[in-house]
Structure formats: structure tokens, C-alpha cells
Amino acid sequence: MTYDPVGGIKPLITLDYAPDITTGSPFLNNVGVGTPQTVTGDTTVNSIKIVDPNGSIVIESGTLTVNSGMMLAAASSTNGISGAGTLAFASGMDGIIAGDGNLTISTNITSPAPFIKAGTGKLTLSGNNSLSTVYISADRSCRRSPARWVTTAPFTLAAAERWSCRMGWICPPSICLCTTAGEF
């Protein structure tokens, strides 16, 4: 969604998205990622939409901050989001990854507010992530287990109505104690 002083609140259309992420840009662009992108220093964008399987982001250094907290995987990304840098969501903003596309994020993620996965696409995380609470679609939550916070043992949270956790995790219907690496 965006705000137009003439038309008021409206959904984003293709023309509302910049085609590239510009490292260090002072503009809060909504970025439609359809080609490989490289971030080489601290950069802030308003939102990210993966629009093509070739759309990928390498965060070589610094932090790529999503100011609105919104990422849309409209298409499955072949190479996802990777690199030595960090993907962050702005302070006070939920980090939301939604959509029907599959996305792998191997870079580290920082989300001080809740991290939300919505939509039918598969999200795979493998970085050293700092997430407070993770919500998976239909009102299910996975709260971090301090004893397991640093481990990278995999877990899988299946469809919204059923849970599958590997490695002997305890999974009551509403809370799953797990790591921050795995597939949603």
C-alpha cells in the first residue's frame, strides 16, 4: 500500500517499484527485484518484492534494512538472499515475508519485533538470526528457546494446521521451541 495525496491509500502497482537497490541511497524505494542485486554497505529500502526467479540479493557488507518491514515473494527466487551482511527490519516494525514464491535467506536476519511468515511459499532460513517471536500464517507462533538460540539444527514448520519439528523439539499446538534455522 502507498499514499497518494490525490487518490489516498492505494495498492502498489508495477510503476511504484524501483528496479534496483542502490547502496546508501537516501530514498526509501519500494524495490521490485527481478535481477541479481548487490548491497555493499548500509542501505535502507521501504519494501522488497521478488518479481522474477532471477531476482536475488547479495548483501556483501553492512545492513539492508526494510523500513516498512514488508517483503513479498511474488515469484520463487533461484538464489534468494545471501552474503556476509545482515537483513534487518526497522525498529518497531514487524518483519513480514509473504507470498506464494519460495525464498531462501542464508544471510543473518535481525527483527526486533515479531517476524511473520505468510502465504503458501516456502521460506528457508539458515543464517545466525536474531528473532524475538516468529509467527507462521494462521495464528501459530514459535517462540525462541534460549537454550537452543545459537544452534543451527534444522526445523520444519509445515502447513498452518500441522507442525513438524525435527531433532526432538517439543511442539505443543500453539508454541514450538526451536532454532532460528530451518524451513517455514
Image (spheres, grey):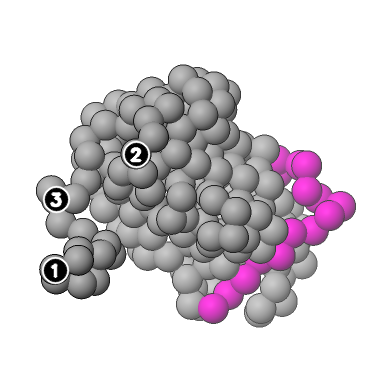
Q: Residue at x 30, y 47 (%)?
A: 30
Residue highlighted by disc 1 = 6
- Give the SS element for disc 3: helix
Kind of residue indicated by mark 2: Phe
Residue 153's spot in the image, x, y percent? 70, 44
The circle drawn on residue 14 is 3
Residue 125's spot in the image, x, y percent? 55, 44
Of badges 2 and 3, nearer the viewer stands 2
Q: Is 169 inside the magenta-drawn segment?
A: no
- Badge 2 crowding class, 10 Å Cα cut-off, few under 14, some 14 to 19, many 20 or more, is few
> Are the two marked residues, 1 and 2, in contact with CB atoms closer than 8 angstroms?
no
Q: Which residues are magenta?
A: 139-153
Of badges 1 and 2, nearer the viewer stands 1
- Give the SS element for disc 1: loop
- Badge 3 crowding class, 10 Å Cα cut-off, few under 14, some 14 to 19, many 20 or more, is few
| Residue closest to the far front | 5
Looking at the picture, tell me which residue is in the foreground, 114 or 82. 114
Residue highlighted by disc 2 = 27
Residue 119's spot in the image, x, y percent? 37, 65
Q: Residue at x 65, y 54 (%)?
A: 112
- For the N terminus, give its image quadrant: bottom left
Quadrant of the image occupied by residue 27: top left
122 relative to 162, above or below:
above
Structural distance between the alpha carbons of marks 1 and 2: 21 Å
> Are the two marked residues, 1 and 3, in contact with CB atoms closer than 8 angstroms?
no
Kind of residue indicated by mark 3: Thr
Looking at the picture, tell me which residue is in the foreground, 10 or 167. 10
- Give the SS element for disc 2: loop
Label 1 vs 3, first from the N-terminus: 1
Label 2 vs 3, first from the N-terminus: 3
Relative placement, left or right, of 87 versus 24 is right
Residue 101's spot in the image, x, y percent? 31, 52
